[in-house]
Image: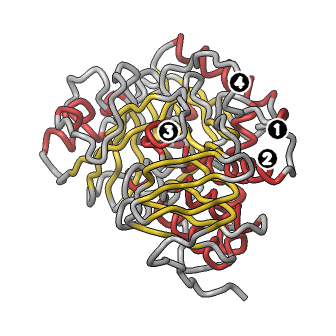
Amino acid sequence: MRAMVRWRYVDALPPAADLVIVGGGVVGAATAFHAARAGLKPVLIERRPALCTLTTAVAAGGFRLQQDGADDLALVRESVELFLNFADVTGQSTYDPAVRQQGYLWLTRSAEGAQRQRSVVAAQRSWGLDDVQVLTGAEVHSAFPFVSDEVIQARWRQGDGLMDPRAITYGLAAGSCALGGSIRLGCEVTGISSRGRSVGVSTSDGEVEAGAVVLAAGPFSAPVAALAGVDLPVTTVRRQKVTMPDVPVVPQDAPMTIDEDTGAHWRPALRGAVLLFTDPSTPPSPPAEDVPLDHRFVFDLLDPSSPVALARITPFWRDVWEHGAGAWFLQAGQYTMTPDRRPLIGPAGPECVWVNAGYSGHGVMASPAGSRLLLDVITGAAAADRNPYRPDRSFEAAQPPHPL
């Protein structure tokens, strides 16, 4: 029988803890959950008044095994198993991640793009992803009538899909609390001091002595790491999304639909859609509590004359634009990017200071498994030198131009 959710929001920090986790998004919640499963008593600290109110709250809400490397595929595969068995794994049924395996459909209109897709699929199959397909133009149009006739090929996997990032965050946090973890909201970390076999974490609520601290603060991971004298190899990059509820022309059973030639993509949501574009030319910007919005972003995706217009792959967006149907609202968050677009999971440098950050836009789909890996390394269940995401690795710049 699954336990009822019993939150352990504490009014003050304890003087000591097995593990302090800094950050109340999905990465912090996943870290707390796996720490509690490992038998530790974690304390999760979040400086905002609620969990999941910054980056995770504006995530696209997709997951895919169509990854760019074998290690990343294995990591996300493990996370997807958790999503598919969420209530049983977390021991609670209050928060349902609403998993819908409607697929990821990557579309191309160019011969160059078609060749690139075939190469990507061949690599993915060599890593054991045997259910990813290359679809001809005719197969695409037969299966997905809303796709433009200009599309000549697609790569497709039915088992990829959509979920609710907030429910995942809250469900993992609830699972942690059920196992003895606790949460302190409205508490800001002001200092971190490694003391050999322990670490002192100074906060706006006072100090807590911990066996270890994990930095999982998303775009603020680098400033928090600096408190411990650590320079994380990350940058923060703004990503925006447009939500258009109640757009009847959007098929609600559609997959995540991506223009692989530009990086623009959309997914069904709220009887309408969420529209996104991971512009590779966006420059880094400082971490921000309130990420500035650029309303031209909406026009980039909806105006058919734009070079990244979604109408290029799905013509019904032209009708939405021309008829002026549908309200929209714009949100923004920040990806925390590493040079190779792979997360930092492991020791940060000073004794007892660990990092779980830098997921480069894949935090929701990869951090549940990444956090399990981190706890295995912390507790000695996994060898540190076998961890492909260790922070002291050699970085090589990632090649794919559109980190969806």
CA distance for labels 2 and 1: 6 Å
Query: Mark on residue 361?
Result: 3
Mark with earlier residue (3, 4): 3
Residue 5 appears at what percent x and percent y? 57, 83
Q: Residue at x 13, y 44 (%)?
A: 323
Q: Amino acid at mark 2?
A: Val
Q: Residue at x 40, y 56 (%)?
A: 57
Name the foreground residue: 335 vs 323.
Answer: 335
Secondary-structure class at tag 2: helix
Mark with earlier residue (4, 2): 2
Residue 247 appears at what percent x and percent y? 26, 55
Q: Amino acid at mark 4?
A: Arg
Identify the image quadrant of the N terminus. Answer: bottom right
Side (left or right) of 37 relative to 160 = right
Quadrant in the rendering for residue 6: bottom right
For the residues bearing labels 2 and 1, Cβ distance under 8 angstroms: yes
